[in-house]
Structures are given as structure tokens and as C-alpha cells.
Image (cartoon, rainbow, N blue to C red):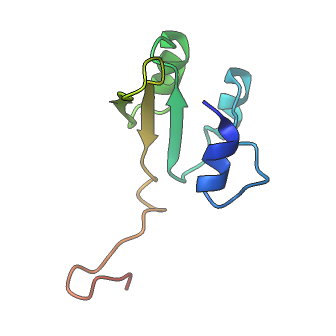
Amino acid sequence: MDTRLVAIIAGQPGADPVLWPDQLEALAPTTRPQLFLLHPEDAENLSRLRQTYPTGTLSSYNSPMEGRDFRIYFVPAAADEAVLVDPEIGETP
């Protein structure tokens, strides 16, 4: 995956969103939501993510182009950081 494209789509064209395995522990104390993209065969780092962020959920993206599949590990925000939306007015209180 070309990480420059991920940064551009996220609205941060100059950023480098690559996170190397040895950098994972530095993120662990955060309460913000996290999104990790992994190679489908990267069992070792998926295991690390599950240990570090047990509330995360795993899904897969199956690309129509051969060899472009990836896994998505999403970690929701901690309860104190979650943005609550008032269903009656459709915005945050």
C-alpha cells in the first residue's frame, strides 16, 4: 500500500502514517480512536494489536485487484473521549 495515498485521503498530504511494530507501545496510552491497516498474512502484528487494544475489531478488505487485500483493525475511542450525538437534534450536545 502506498502510505502517501492514505495521508492524502486523510487530508494530511505531508504526513507519514506508517507505524513500525516497535512504535506500537508508544501509542497504547491514548484514548483516541485508532485505525490500523495490515497485510493479510501479518499474524504477528495482529496479535500485538489484539494484546495492546483488546477492544478492537478486525475486518478485511478484499480488493478486486489481485494481491491488494488488507486487514483493518479498528480501536474505538475510550468512553471518556467518545463524541456523543444527541439523536433528537443530530449533533453533539
In this view of the protein, which residue sits in the foreground, 87 or 17? Answer: 17
Q: Is residue 1 above or below residue 7?
A: above
Q: Name, please, the residue furthest toward the right.
A: 14
Of all residues, the one furthest to the left in this rendering is 88
Classify residue 93 as left or right of residue 26: left
Give the image location of residue 79, x and y in percent.
40, 57
The quadrant of the rendering that contains the N terminus is: top right
Image spot of residue 28 (x, y percent): 61, 37
Q: Which residue is rendered at x = 55% and y = 18% of the image?
A: 45
Within the image, what quadrant is residue 12 found in? bottom right
- Number of residue marks: 0
* Quarter occupied by the C terminus: bottom left
Up/down of 8 relative to 61, above or below: below
In the depicted view, which residue is nearer to us: 6 or 19?
6
Report the side of 76 relative to 88 (left or right).
right
| Residue 91 image offset from top left, x and y in percent | 35, 83
Based on the displayed image, in which of its 4 quarters is residue 60 positioned? top left
Q: Which residue is drawn at 65% across and 30% down?
A: 24
- Quarter where residue 3 is shown: top right
Q: Look at the picture and state if 43 lies above or below 53.
A: above
Q: Residue at x 64, y 45 (%)?
A: 5
Q: Residue at x 51, y 42 (%)?
A: 35
